[in-house]
Image (spheres, rainbow, N blue to C red):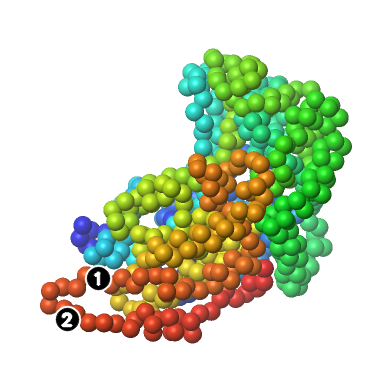
Amino acid sequence: MSEQQHEHVRVAVIGSGFGGLGAAVRLRREGITDFVVLERADSIGGTWRDNSYPGCACDVPSHLYSFSFAPNPDWPRAFSGQEHIRAYLEHVADTFRLRPHIRFRHEVTMMRWDGDALRWEIETTAGTLTADVVVSATGPLSDPKMPEIPGLAGFPGRVFHSARWDHDYDLRGKRVAMVGTGASAIQIVPAIQPQVEHLTLFQRTPPWVMRRMDRRITTVERLLHRRLPATQAVRRGLLWGIRELQVSAFTKRPNQLGLIESLAKANMAAVVKDPELRAKLTPSYRIGCKRILLSSDYYPALTRPNVDVVASGLAEVRGSTAVAADGTEAEVDAIIFGTGFHVTDMPIAERVVGADGITLADAWKGGMQSLRGATAAGFPNWMTIIGPNTGLGNSSMILMIESQLNYMADYLRQLNVLGGRVALAARPSAVGAWNRHVQARMRRTVWNTGGCTSWYLDASGRNTTIWPGTTGEFRRETREVDLAEYEVIRPPRTPREPAGTSCATTSAAGAAAAAHDDLTAGEAQ
């Protein structure tokens, strides 16, 4: 493929959710304008564009679920809904002049590393381009997971996933099956319960649910945050600090979560008076093993006369009859799946071919592994935002994203200091050491010891999703690139080029350290 046939950019960012837009903002602030954001849809927003189901909202407080460099004084509620979060992302795209860089309807179908040219060849549904560096920000909650249910193909009614909501289908007066009891389901159930004729909830595992202390943010509060930005920074800092203090219970002392468990049981008992229903809804695992869900209207909805809770997963569909694993049957007109996403087996991994000619999916067959959640062995100049072991169980992912943006920025500075055509490849030994460190810390956590099976675990039962520490710890671990963890790759020498040695790596480390500068504009966590 000749260079004349396609466009070349310094950086290609994949995805336009929080990770992709954050990367684009940071690139511009680093003085890099030769980049594109490749988006498969026709608008920005990522998971906050795709998830538009009734009741969709965030379970992290609004003032913490936003970029530190783009504070929003006008959040309408303590926990904002999908429409407000998506509007915020549109605002970020406009404020930081990102739209000229975004290529809509450019779904990446394949990325291949060219070891001679030291660049990535990227094939999209709208054409081909090359890039020196790829930043993959597709996110783990981008591809819905639909279970294989016998007989589902012959179901005469409507079927859809919560992340692909069918807004043309009117649920009023319908008999509806809701499959799953995760974060989406507990928002959907109370939103549609008043409309449907009957709702059958197929619950394989009950979640722990705490009250969602949501409220409208007053006009006075918003005015104060607008006129005195420091008050918003203080609010954000308090929200962050409270969650940092909670981390040790999740990671080192899971038994301390017993008090929280008691509060969750009291919350349920105050609403669910039927002992049989309460028994169905009481989890048998330690709270925190799965994500603790927040809702003040989920339990009340389940007590309504038009709702049945089936304490068993959907096993089969016979015509218009949904059949649970315990044999319970329900006649339904529609089946809604709230069954999560491909998190530990992200489809994008099938489309990334590295230096050894194998896909990232093949490289990760034994479990996802990366260096500091960002780079993978065998895939030079390829980075991911929200990579392996960067997820959180109790705080805002935006904090983790910003830490990874720091790492991305320093990675690019290192390349600039090294000069010329150059790539950095994570050393397998460094990747292995980092992951042994992470997995050793994981052993004591509630996610590994709490007695549940969650989407945090891969097919072999290994937790490749969650970060076993505080967001402050992760920020320190990703503040800058350690060149000792990377191999510096130069183009192959031609026969006429003299052999020689280079001290580029050493000089680059010193220069990059001197040049390092973190995000400004209110980066207090």
Which image quarter is the C terminus in? bottom right
Q: Position of residue 86 (x, y in %)?
A: 60, 52
Q: Position of residue 211 (x, y in %)?
A: 79, 45
- Verify CB contact (< 8 Å) between mark 2 and mark 1: no
- Could you tell me which residue is drawn at 76 percent across and 65 percent down? 238
- Could you tell me which residue is drawn at 41 percent across and 46 percent down? 365
Which residue position is annotated with label 1? 491
The answer to whether 488 appears left or right of 339 in the picture is left
Vertical relation: 175 (above or below) 264: above
Gap between marks 2 and 1 measured at Cα: 14 Å
Q: How many marks?
A: 2
The answer to whether 310 appears left or right of 512 in the picture is right
Front-most of 348 and 484? 484
- Could you tell me which residue is drawn at 59 percent across and 65 percent down? 474
Front-most of 366 and 136? 366
Q: Of discs 2 and 1, which sits in the foreground?
A: 2
Q: Residues within 10 Å of mark 2 (few under 14, many from 20)?
A: few
- Could you tell me which residue is drawn at 69 percent across and 57 percent down? 252
For marks 2 and 1 on the same chain, the one whose residue lies earlier in the sequence: 1
The answer to whether 80 appears left or right of 33 in the picture is right
Badge 1 marks a residue whose secondary structure is loop
Vertical relation: 27 (above or below) 139: below
Q: Residues within 10 Å of mark 1 (few under 14, many from 20)?
A: few
Vertical relation: 438 (above or below) 211: below
Three-letter amino acid code of the residue under disc 2: Pro
Q: Is residue 211 visible?
A: no
Q: Position of residue 304 (x, y in %)?
A: 79, 26
Vertical relation: 38 (above or below) 71: above
Determine the image quadrant of residue 432.
bottom left
Which image quarter is the N terminus in? bottom left
Mark seen at residue 498? 2
Three-letter amino acid code of the residue under disc 1: Pro
